[in-house]
Image (tube, rainbow, N blue to C red):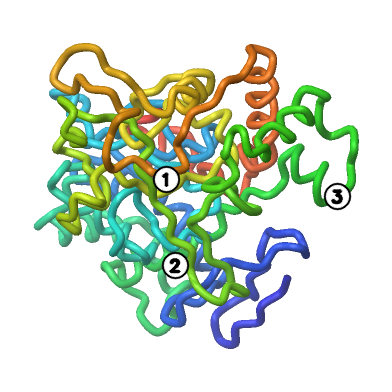
Amino acid sequence: MLYHLPDMGRPFIWPIPAWMAPPPVPEDNPMTSAKVELGRHLFYDARISLDSTVACASCHDQARAFTDGRALAIGIGIGIDDTLGIRNAPSLANVGYFPLLTRGNPHMTSLKFQALVPMFGDNPVEMGGNGREGEIFARLSADPYYVKAFATAFPDRPEVDLFTVTRALGAFQRTLISLDSPYDRFKYWDEKDALSDAAKRGEQLFFDHRFECYHCHVGVMFTDNLQTTRSASAETGSHNTGLYNINGTGAYPPEATGLHEFTGSDDDMGRFRTPSLRNVGVTAPYFHDGSVATLKEVLAHYARAGRKIEEGPFAGDGAQNPHKDGMIIGFEASDDEIADIIAFLHSLTDGTFLTNPAYSDPWPENHPASIDRITP
């Protein structure tokens, strides 16, 4: 699909099949190829952090569908005192389609504003830029590549500052579209051999009322958090899945309570955004705090209708959480059925997306942008 953007460089071509609508694009940040390419360089540049060790890519690795394989995200202190975040790094695959960009914050709906959180946030400190913006932007401005790239991407404002950096990062992330899994080829391109027999059986089970998976993991993105250019309104699904029930009170660990953190409502305790299941086979560990290691364990959690923690500070039976979503009712399944569902979930992995050079690290080996960068 071709979009002509006058006076904004080369027209941008969305990497999507004809059957899918593009993601929404803010009027104040139109897409251009130059801006996307600038955003890709910034995404992989650790000089955007205070000590030049943490880039966006430090927590969002392409081979893992832009997650990091860790339970909790890292920050600039990882090399000093093993500083960790308080939530699991979410996948950025198809992030431009998600009206809710974080797991629990209902107000974070803009990619350019979300970029401010890792750059300047202090709970946790990820990139450590708060109050040091001038130092960081001066460092980037000294690179000859950026002098030309910012002038090309923002001809009316060729400056390295919050306005341009966050918009370039948002433009690049909006291109991270994953729609070429074996399941896509099976369902949308009529390639009947694209799925294994186990995955085909798993598809039937996934959409069966016994399991109720599809009520929250719905539609082309397998989530009820979605907006496209054709959407009449945004879907913003979030749910309490019974992961915790501390001492039978319904509480979640205080550092991550979901929507409750922002609304203060008991009804919102433990409600987190429904993640897309696309590429779920490569994004372990799972849930908002990375506390479940495998897909088999995830399914065991839902089979039980909630997790039971026997001892420790978070002890409690999540199945009895009074705030748990009513769709989480449990199920019985054979080992073969569980294996088939997992085979189906793996069929949602888009190998092309995980290796697409358009999304990969553009910096040469041992460049200052990457030489000290923490990698997953």
Against 237, residue 316 (above or below) is: above
- Residue receiving disc 1: 44
Quarter of the picture holding the N terminus: bottom right
Label 3 neighbour load within 10 Å: few <14, some 14-19, many 20+? few
- The image quadrant that residue 333 belongs to is top right
Q: Residue at x 63, y 70 (%)?
A: 12
Q: Residue at x 19, y 50 (%)?
A: 266
Proximity of marks 2 and 3: CB atoms separated by less than 8 Å: no
Against 352, residue 157 (above or below) is: below
- SS category of the residue bearing label 1: loop
- SS category of the residue bearing label 3: loop
Q: From mark 2 to mark 3, how far is it between C-alphas? A: 41 Å
- Residue receiving disc 2: 148
Label 1 neighbour load within 10 Å: few <14, some 14-19, many 20+? many
Amino acid at the residue labelled 1: Tyr
Amino acid at the residue labelled 2: Lys
Q: Residue furthest bottom?
A: 6
Residue 54 rendering spot, x and y as whole percentages:
29, 39
- The image quadrant that residue 191 belongs to is top right
Q: Mark 1 vs mark 2: give the one in front.
A: 1
Residue 161 rendering spot, x and y as whole percentages:
27, 68
- Comparing 164 with 282, the one in front is 282
Q: Mark 3 vs mark 1: give the one in front.
A: 3
- Residue receiving disc 3: 189
